[in-house]
Image (cartoon, grey):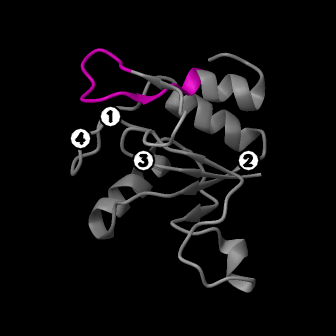
Amino acid sequence: MFIAIDFDGTCVDHKFPEVGNPAPNSVDTLKALNFAGFNLILWTMRSEEKLQDAINWFKDNDISLFGIQRNPTQDSWSSSPKCYAHVYIDDAAFGAPLIKPEGFARPCIDWSKVRDHFLGVSA
């Protein structure tokens, strides 16, 4: 399964252009999704050096990315700029599970609910 994941407000607190603190349970959940065989695709508005900051965050946290801004499997059948995924996790998505941790600029994804949905275990 391909999961496209936003970055600011999803994996980390909204501090753009800086990289915010990790959203609660984001690192552990993303690692667990990797371990369970999900293909994670970074799908963010960040570009150039700010995109590299997000990529480095995944590397620094030992979270593997299957793709960055694209699903590499779609190149053989589409030239669309839209990233192909089965699921899109984004704090701006309608119905996304959100929490507002103390000290965070805005609500972020509730990774405990994401983990429970995909892996059947609460973080």
8, above or below 80, in the image: above
Instruction: Provide the residue span drawn in magenta.
Output: 100-112
**How many neighbours does mark 4 have within 10 angstroms: few (below 14), some (14-19), or many (20 or more)?**
some
Could you tell me which secondary element the residue under label 4 belongs to? loop
| Secondary structure that dominates the magenta span | loop
| Amino acid identity at mark 2 | Phe
* Discs 4, 3 touching: Cβ within 8 Å: no
114, above or below 39, in the image: above
Which of disc 2 and disc 1 is earlier in sequence?
1
Q: Mark 4 to mark 2: distance in Å?
A: 27 Å
Query: Which picture quadrant has residue 108?
Result: top left
| Amino acid identity at mark 4 | Lys
Q: Position of residue 49 (x, y in %)?
A: 28, 66
Q: On the image, numbered disc 1 is attached to which residue?
A: 13
Q: Position of residue 73 (x, y in %)?
A: 72, 73
Q: Mark 1 to mark 2: distance in Å?
A: 23 Å
Q: Mark 4 to mark 1: distance in Å?
A: 6 Å
Could you tell me which secondary element the residue under label 1 belongs to? loop
Could you tell me which secondary element the residue under label 3 belongs to? loop
Which of disc 2 and disc 4 is earlier in sequence?
4
Q: On the image, numbered disc 3 is attached to which residue?
A: 7
| Amino acid identity at mark 3 | Phe
**Left or right for 13, reference 35:** left
Q: Residue at x 44, y 46 (%)?
A: 60
Q: Residue at x 24, y 47 (%)?
A: 16
**How many neighbours does mark 1 have within 10 angstroms: few (below 14), some (14-19), or many (20 or more)?**
many
Is residue 57 or residue 103 the one in the foreground? Answer: 103
